[in-house]
Amino acid sequence: MPKEKNERPRPDTVLVELPVCDVPAASWPLHIDVRLTPVQSQALRRITHGLDIQRATLENGRRVVNATDAVRFVLEQIESPSGTNP
């Protein structure tokens, strides 16, 4: 059956397991400036585009439409030690 014109493509999903530790409250950078490798850049573009297609939003309600939003979205998905998002 052909896809409708307005139907959005469904992106693939991946499960990433990361170690997350409790850490004492301390000063930590609120800004990062990073140069990505071509492979990392492609991965971030794929994540950003997939989140945009799914109309993902940040906790503040903003749509995920760029790489910075995508990084923020990923970090917001990590629960705090109390079991809730920070």
Image: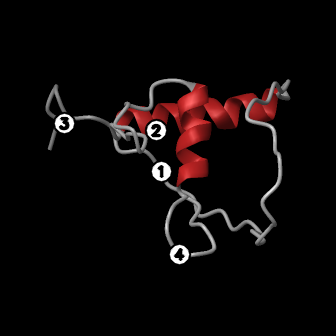
Disc nearer the start of the sequence (4/1): 1
C-beta proximity under 8 Å, tags 3 and 4: no
> How far apart are labels 4 and 1 at the CA level?
27 Å
The answer to which of 1 and 85 lies nearer the viewer is 85
- Residue type, label 1: Asp
> How far apart are labels 2 and 4 at the CA level?
26 Å
- Residue type, label 2: Gly
The part of the image, by quadrant, that contains residue 39 is: top right
> How far apart are labels 1 and 2 at the CA level?
8 Å
The answer to which of 29 and 65 lies nearer the viewer is 29
| Residue 83, disc | 4
10 Å neighbourhood of mark 3: few (<14), some, or many (≥20)? few
Task: Give the residue number, with chain letter if any, for mark 3.
Answer: 3
| Residue 75, disc | none
Q: Nearer the viewer, mark 2 or mark 4?
A: 4
> How far apart are labels 3 and 4 at the CA level?
40 Å
The answer to which of 33 and 36 lies nearer the viewer is 33
> How far apart are labels 1 and 3 at the CA level?
17 Å
Task: Give the residue number, with chain letter if any, for mark 1.
Answer: 12
Mark 3 element type: loop
Task: Give the residue number, with chain letter if any, for mark 2.
Answer: 50
